[in-house]
Image (cartoon, rainbow, N blue to C red):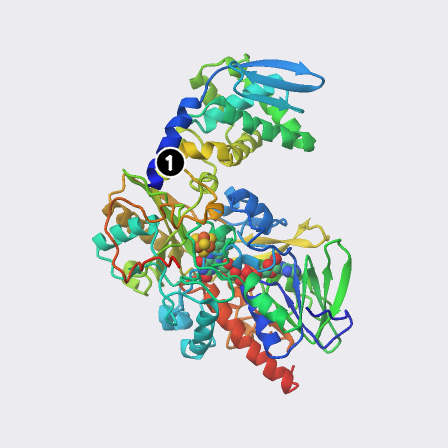
């Protein structure tokens, strides 16, 4: 029963996802970048517009999930920006890293084809810049509860009384364990 | 709750409130002994635990800086996180999964049973299973371990049922929902039975899983003899001219330093901090560190031979629902050199939530091959390998004098190289675990490398002779009579089984020895 509900959520969720390219506005020091259809926006303190678009693209190429809109990758850039705002060292690492990407073919990296973009990233894969973006992305992307339904991960259950009555043992296949191996649950 | 004066030197000071220290504190208090319990972390509880993996990690884990070296992959992927353990009242018993197994008889005689193994510093324990059995009995009762004392087993969740399916088809015999320190039925004191909430690693919000935080420590507080100081980090153990320890210097939450006098000091900061504290307590009398005349403090560090096998299936599993460690296969736990290695291993189900799965499935990996695996998350099942690893003199905790912590003290460096025996065992376990899942119909199987160490052992080991170890058969320092080691660092060898039940049994036993020694004025 838990199973079906999750999948309905997931389909509905996928329908709502949007994809698109961004428009940029700069107002009073903070950069804000808005997706074409206005479905997502990021507001940044330290990272400039070129850096933001580059990092967003990098995040997607590192952890590509076609079913996810840019909204989720934008959140990664916001998290990176928060870190860069508190750490000049990180800010510099990101700025210099983006410059290195752009130098690879003497043309903004963001304008290269996907194959060339990946090739440049692989070339610098042992560099601290790539390590930083990768580490930040793998934590920030999957730590976003709003994308968990896409992966049918349900997260915290304590507030619903646990999974005891929410499908903890609803596997619809495989062998049924005997009572000795797996006794009945206590339900009070 | 008691409050003792800093100059009150009749108290026993215990450093660390986890499995070892928390249990010892309660056992001593029950015997009428006054205890000051210094705990570096803060006090949380079921109501403040956060069932979100990274947020909980930030709340409970030990995040003070550490460094790593050696050929283990953790040193590359998590250079400042050699271990995944806690800094909070209750220590790692807030995080732990609850698997509670007794050691096997031959594991107390590892050197005799396995013989001399090149590159391994094997030693027999100075105690036997028979000697520890009465204390295992008491530990199992205290922790309400399922399948002991008439406590029923827990119900198997989906993750267990996948493992069970493959194990049975493969012909494995001993497959069940484990011996767990998790209530399968509710308790009178208000602790609930397991609600299958699935966040055992993040602190059980139902209090169903045993933790010293809400069992041993409140029981000790009720005696009126426990002075628990949270946010109090021990920096150095002091001694007098006769070589007896006299007190512990610690920093409180504000960073102010105090010296608490003591009659006896017990170190239970887990196997990285305990040797670090002894090494940081070096003096002109003990130039190589307190209690380190053998040179063994910090050496023989063990972490169990681990690894995980995850597999994907055609239909959903939702492994994250229900107990994290939901079942066990014990058919490989025995010693059988025909398999190509000494010692044995257990296979135990394990699940990670989506955030931790991304971090641990293949640390450092990126690209479409990785995300294709992550897309299968809801269809994955997982198990963890835990097997005996070889103690090695060169696997050790040392002071890294180049890196200092917030108190200006050298941090711990953890050096680890897998022994060939560990690698052969891991390979065998990966193969068997993969076979289990293939028998259950796996589409793909992933061999996942060890996480930062959750089981940290051996760095102040017990020995029959002073030259071979740091403490005697009671966890008492060979060099300093009123200094004890009370955590997993006193393990002579690691055995196949998860360590905590044995840590608790040893703490119960040690409390009797300390009481008797104090009564007879021997300590
Ligand atoms: C995710 C996870 C799952 C686990 N699952 C299992 C399992 O299923 N079965 C099992 O048997 N084991 C399991 N373990 C291991 C188990 O948690 C440990 O074996 C056990 O808690 C170790 O007990 P300890 O007393 O040595 O240390 P801990 O329980 O770690 O306690 C040490 C305490 O000392 C404090 N401390 C350290 N240094 C100082 C200092 N200088 N001053 C003051 N305080 C200090 C720390 O803050 C900490 O609170 C698991 C561990 C983890 C992390
Ligand atoms: S599964 Fe059971 S023991 Fe684990 S956190 Fe949930 S209620 Fe607690």
Instruction: Find residue B484 and report its horizontal and vertical position in percent.
Output: 60, 72
Q: Residue at x 68, y 29 (%)?
A: A85
Q: Residue at x 51, y 42 (%)?
A: B77
Picture quarter with the N terminus of chain B: bottom right
Q: Is residue B459 above or below residue B515?
A: above
Closest to the observer, B102 or B104: B102
Q: Is residue B490 above or below residue A62?
A: below
Chain of residue at mark 1 = A
Q: Is residue A117 above or below residue A163?
A: above
Q: How many marks?
A: 1
| Position of residue B357 in the picture relative to residue B293 (left or right) | left
Query: Which picture quadrant has residue B466?
Result: bottom right
Instruction: Find residue B173 and report its horizontal and vertical position in percent.
Output: 25, 61
- Ligand 2 contact, mark 1 (Cβ < 8 Å): no
Q: Residue at x 25, y 50 (%)?
A: B166
Instruction: Find residue A116 and report its horizontal and vertical position in percent.
Output: 45, 17
User: Is residue B285 in sight in this rendering?
Assistant: yes
Q: Secondary structure at mark 1?
A: helix
Picture quarter with the C terminus of chain B: bottom right
Q: How many residues crowd mark 1 within 10 Å: few (<14), some (14–19), many (20+)? A: some
Closest to the observer, A139 or B320: B320
Residue extending farthest to the front is A188
Residue extending farthest to the bottom is B520
- Judged from the image, the quadrant occupied by ligand 2 is bottom left
Disc 1 marks which residue?
A6
User: Is residue B456 in sight in this rendering?
Assistant: no
Instruction: Find residue A142 and report its horizontal and vertical position in percent.
Output: 48, 35
């Amino acid at each position: 029963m838990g199973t079906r509900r999750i999948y309905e959520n997931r389909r509905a969720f996928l329908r709502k996802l949007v994809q698109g390219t961004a428009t940029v506005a700069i107002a009073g020091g903070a950069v804000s970048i808005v997706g074409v259809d206005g479905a997502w926006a990021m507001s940044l303190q330290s990272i400039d517009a070129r850096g933001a678009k580059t990092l967003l693209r990098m995040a997607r190429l590192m952890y590509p999930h076609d079913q996810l809109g840019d909204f989720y990758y934008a959140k990664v850039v916001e998290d990176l920006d928060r870190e860069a705002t508190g750490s000049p060292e990180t800010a510099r690492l990101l700025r210099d890293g983006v410059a290195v990407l752009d130098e690879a073919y003497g043309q903004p990296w963001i304008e290269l084809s996907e194959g060339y973009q990946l090739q440049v990233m692989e070339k610098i894969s042992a560099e601290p810049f790539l390590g930083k973006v990768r580490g930040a992305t793998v934590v920030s992307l999957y730590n976003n509860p709003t994308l968990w339904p896409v992966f049918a991960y349900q997260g915290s259950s304590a507030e619903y009384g646990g999974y005891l009555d929410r499908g903890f043992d609803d596997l619809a296949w495989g062998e049924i364990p005997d009572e000795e191996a797996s006794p009945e649950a206590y339900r009070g | 709750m008691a409050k003792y004066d800093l100059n009150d030197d009749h108290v026993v000071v215990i450093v660390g409130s986890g499995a070892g220290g928390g249990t010892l504190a309660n056992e001593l208090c029950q015997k009428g002994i006054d205890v000051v319990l210094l705990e570096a972390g803060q006090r949380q509880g079921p109501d403040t635990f956060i069932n979100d993996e990274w947020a909980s990690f930030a709340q409970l884990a030990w995040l003070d800086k550490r460094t790593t070296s050696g050929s283990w992959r953790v040193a590359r992927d998590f250079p400042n996180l050699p271990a995944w353990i806690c800094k909070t009242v209750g220590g790692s018993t807030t995080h732990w999964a609850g698997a509670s197994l007794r050691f096997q008889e031959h594991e107390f005689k590892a050197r005799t049973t396995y013989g001399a193994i090149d590159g391994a510093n094997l030693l027999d324990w100075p105690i036997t299973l028979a000697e520890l059995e009465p204390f295992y009995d008491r530990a199992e009762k205290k922790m309400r371990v399922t399948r002991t004392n008439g406590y029923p087993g827990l119900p198997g969740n989906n993750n267990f049922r996948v493992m069970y399916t493959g194990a049975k088809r493969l012909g494995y015999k001993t497959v069940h929902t484990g011996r767990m320190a998790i209530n399968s039925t509710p308790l009178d004191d208000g602790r609930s039975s397991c609600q299958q909430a699935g966040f055992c690693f993040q602190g059980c919000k139902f209090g169903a899983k045993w933790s010293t935080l809400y069992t041993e420590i409140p029981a000790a507080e009720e005696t009126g003899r426990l002075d628990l100081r949270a946010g109090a980090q021990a920096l150095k153990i002091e001694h007098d001219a006769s070589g007896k320890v006299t007190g512990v210097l610690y920093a409180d939450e504000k960073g102010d330093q105090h010296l608490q006098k003591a009659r006896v000091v017990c170190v239970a900061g887990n196997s990285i901090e305990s040797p670090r504290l002894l090494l940081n307590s070096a003096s002109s009398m003990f130039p190589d560190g307190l209690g380190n005349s053998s040179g063994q403090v910090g050496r023989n560090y063990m972490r169990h031979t681990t690894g995980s096998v995850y597999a994907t299936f055609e239909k959903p599993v939702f492994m994250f629902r229900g107990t994290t460690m939901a079942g066990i296969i014990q058919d490989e736990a025995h010693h059988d050199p025909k398999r190509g290695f000494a010692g044995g291993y257990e296979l135990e189900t394990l699940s990670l939530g989506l955030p931790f799965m991304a971090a641990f499935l293949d640390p450092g990996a990126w690209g479409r091959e990785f995300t294709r695996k992550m897309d299968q998350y809801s269809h994955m099942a997982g198990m963890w390998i835990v097997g005996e690893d070889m103690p090695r003199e060169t696997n050790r905790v040392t002071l890294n004098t180049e890196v200092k912590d917030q108190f200006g003290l050298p941090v711990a460096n953890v050096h680890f190289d897998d022994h060939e025996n560990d690698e052969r065992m891991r390979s065998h376990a990966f193969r068997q675990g993969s076979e289990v899942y293939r028998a259950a119909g796996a589409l793909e199987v992933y061999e996942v490398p060890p996480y930062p160490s959750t089981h940290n052992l051996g760095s102040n080991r017990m020995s029959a002779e002073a030259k071979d170890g740091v403490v005697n058969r009671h966890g008492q320092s060979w060099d300093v009579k009123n200094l004890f080691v009370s955590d997993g660092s006193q393990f002579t060898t690691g055995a196949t089984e998860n360590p905590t039940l044995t840590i608790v049994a040893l703490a119960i036993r040690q409390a009797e020895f300390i009481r008797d020694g104090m009564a007879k004025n021997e300590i």
